[in-house]
Amino acid sequence: MTQTYLITGGSGFIGSHLTERLLERGDRVIVLDDLSTGSLENLSAVRDNPGLRIEIGSVLDELKVDEMVHECDVVVHLAAAVGVRLIVEQPLRSFTTNIRGSEIVIGAAHRYRRKILVASTSEVYGKNGSSKLSETSDRILGPTAVTRWSYSTAKAVDEILALAYHRERGLDAVIVRLFNTVGPRQSPAYGMVIPSLSRQAVRDEPLSVHGDGGQSRCFCHVKDVVEALVGLLDEPRAIGEVFNVGASREITILDLAHKIVEQSGSSSPVELIPYEQAYASGFEDMRRRVPDTAKINDLIGWESKRSLDDILAAAIDDARREQGGTEPALVIDIVREEYAGTA
């Protein structure tokens, strides 16, 4: 059955890929985005699709959100202040957007009895460096004075709010904790490591690795992540549950940088940058973050399929297109309205 999906943050990195996927299978999509971190160019491939509608607006605009939720069947709430650099440099804006925006969107979903998928993050686990983090793993956070933990806290509040609406008021809510998601269209502007290193490599600039480079992460291709989101949206048994979504192949950031140099054919050296030089004083990083995805695998049979080589090839191609100035221009009819706030 064809449905109408409202995707907040739908012109962003993950949102644009999800928009394409839903349109591809015949659904209709309303994108609500204030373009603060997203771009209309991300939707260039589907700009002429009659099932797509784009609204420029913020999740902090209660009237706009109410109108959009009323017109859809399902809500996918992706809009958020994201990226370590943005969160560290603009903690107040990030905290307000992530908590108040989610409160407005979740409240509207309840008001109109719409199913909602809320995108959370692996940051909720904080400094927990267990070999594999399951959905029931403990949250271990640092002091409130460290701005990074405000993002973790805000996203945890989003989860708590969605689950409370589900348990107390019957809202059909699904929560996904996204681990490191990468792929085409991901911007390096907010500290995203693979796009940043890939752009440095194609420019033959030194690759900047923070700390000693021994911190490790697992990287999942955005198209694999989108398949997880679609699978959970289609599965009634996912309602009221929290799911990790990510890859389990672990690599240190130093090894990642060398791999990007090799795969791109770059002559760039790799430079270690102390955290205090890259970020404000008191910044904390996590040594490991590896997801346990057994829960989503057991429910819908999902697992990440694309290799790190595939991910890096796409990121390097993206960087080369940007370097050559071949990004597609986008001309699209959109509804523009004045609104207050950002999201």
Image (spheres, rainbow, N blue to C red):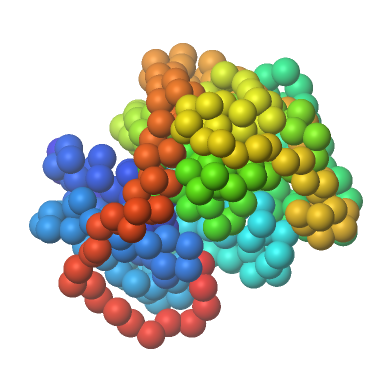
Image height check: is 14 above or below 102? above
Q: Position of residue 258 (x, y in %)?
A: 61, 28
* Number of marks in picture: 0
Q: Residue at x 30, y 69 (%)?
A: 55
Asked if residue 207 can be seen in this view, the reply is yes
Pinpoint residue 212: horizontal percent, then vertical percent.
Answer: 80, 34
Give me the residue at 67% from left, 32% from top: 253
Across and down, in percent, residue 25 comes to: 17, 37
Quarter of the picture containing the N terminus is top left
Lateral position of residue 281 relative to residue 342, left or right: right
Q: Is residue 74 visible?
A: no
x, y percentage for residue 251? 63, 23
Q: Residue furthest bottom?
A: 338
Figure check: 227 above or below 294: below
Q: Residue at x 48, y 43 (%)?
A: 202
Which image quadrant is residue 290 in? top right
Left or right of residue 324, residue 101 in this image: right
**Image-based side of 145 in relation to 109, left or right:** right
Q: Is residue 238 left or right of residue 271?
A: left
Q: Is residue 196 above or below residue 217?
A: below
Residue beneath the point at 53% across and 27% down: 262
Between 112 and 241, the residue placed more toward the observer is 241
